[in-house]
Image (tube, grey):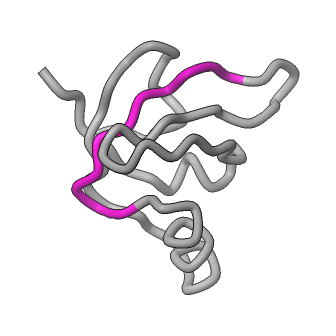
Amino acid sequence: MLSLISVPPGITVKIIQMAGGRGVQMRLFQLGLHPGDTIRVLSVGPFGGPLYIENLTTGVRAAIGRGVARRILVQPVR
């Protein structure tokens, strides 16, 4: 497993675990992200900006801050 922060743009991964407190968990659920979902990193903002992702399971697109992205553990989809 690796952290979402280390996934380059264009790569598709599956969410395995979302670490963090209740606030982080609720924020991710509000964004439509759940363990088991397949997501793709669309781009990474410059100068420490957010990751732009697309949830391929639900079709939702979102911007995820780097601090939160570090807490999302993923596995590459083959």
The relative height of residue 57 versus residue 43 in the rendered view (above or below) is below
27 lies left or right of 8: right
Residue 66 % position (x, y)? 68, 43
- Residue farthest toward the left in the current orientation of the protein: 78
Q: Quadrant of residue 44?
A: top right
40 in the magenta segment? yes
Locate the C terminus by quadrant: top left
- Residue 23's place in the image compared with 69, above or below, is below
- Residue 60 locus on image (x, y percent): 51, 46
Query: Which residue is farthest front?
Result: 59
Residue 6 pos. (x, y %): 49, 28
Q: Residue at x 68, y 42 (%)?
A: 63
The residue under the point 45% across, 53% down is 72
Residue 4 % position (x, y): 46, 39
Residue at 49%, 17% (x, y): give it.
Answer: 8
Question: In the rendered image of this protein, does residue 48 appear above or below residue 8?
Answer: below
Q: What is the chief secondary structure element of the magenta stretch?
A: strand
Counting the numbered discs, the total is 0
Start-end of magenta stretch: 34-44
What residue is shown at x 43% (from left), y 42% (from top)? 59
Residue 12 falls in image quadrant:
top left
> Is residue 17 rendered magenta in the image?
no
Q: Could you say which is closer to the camera, residue 16 or residue 41?
A: 41
Q: Identify the residue at the far right of this view.
A: 47
Quarter of the image containing the N terminus?
Answer: top left
